[in-house]
Image (tube, rainbow, N blue to C red):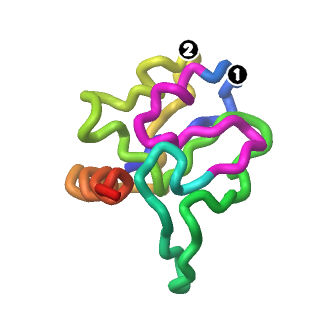
């Protein structure tokens, strides 16, 4: 499963630099597939290919958010999700709507950080 940030977030930003996949963004900030990864382009739903540096719309305008498709729960990097470990208000929690196995998370990590 991926991690999500709840609306209890106090926007302290402690989580953002801890993410090895650059999957955490400040509320209102656009995100990219390529930021913090090796992805030069990505095939999205429908078969469209977009550049890895193409800006994507923010998921939240109010508080920090995690891009689920980039979250690997720090699998392959750390023993536990680092965002949850550093969050002072415990608002980085498992996302019940986004479940993945350990194998799926490791495959995602390999895809995100593929050799260029």
Q: Quadrant of the C terminus?
A: bottom left
Q: Identify the magenta region.
A: 14-31
Query: Mark 2 packing: few (<14 Cα in 10 Å), some, or many (20+)?
Result: some
Query: Could you say which is closer to the camera, residue 102 or residue 29?
Result: 29
CA separation in Å, label 1 and label 2: 9 Å
Query: Mark 1 packing: few (<14 Cα in 10 Å), some, or many (20+)?
Result: some
Percent of width and height locating residue 70 = 46, 51
Query: Could you say which is closer to the camera, residue 61 or residue 110?
Result: 110
Would residue 62 be found to the left or right of residue 46 on screen?
right
Query: Could you say which is closer to the camera, residue 9 or residue 29?
Result: 29
Residue located beneath label 1 in the image: 10
Q: Is residue 54 above or below residue 31?
A: below
Q: Is residue 72 above or below residue 86?
A: below
Percent of width and height locating residue 43 = 49, 75
| Residues at circles 1 and 2 in contact by the CB criterion of under 8 Å | yes
Mark 2 element type: loop
Residue located beneath label 2 in the image: 88
The residue that appears at 51% across and 31% down in the rendered structure is 92
Mark 1 element type: loop
- Looking at the image, the residue that sits furthest to the front is 116
The residue that appears at 56% across and 82% down in the rendered structure is 48
- Looking at the image, the residue that sits furthest to the left is 103
């Amino acid at each position: 499963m991926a991690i999500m940030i709840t609306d209890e977030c106090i926007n302290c930003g402690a989580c953002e630099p801890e993410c090895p996949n650059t999957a955490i963004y400040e509320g209102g900030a656009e995100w990219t597939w390529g930021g913090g990864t090796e992805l030069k382009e990505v095939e999205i739903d429908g078969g469209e290919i977009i550049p890895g540096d193409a800006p994507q719309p923010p998921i939240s305008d109010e508080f920090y958010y995690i891009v689920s498709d980039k979250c690997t729960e720090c699998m392959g990097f750390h023993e536990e999700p680092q965002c949850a470990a550093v969050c002072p208000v415990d608002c980085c929690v498992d996302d019940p709507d986004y479940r993945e196995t350990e194998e799926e998370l490791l495959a995602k990590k390999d895809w995100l950080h593929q050799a260029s």
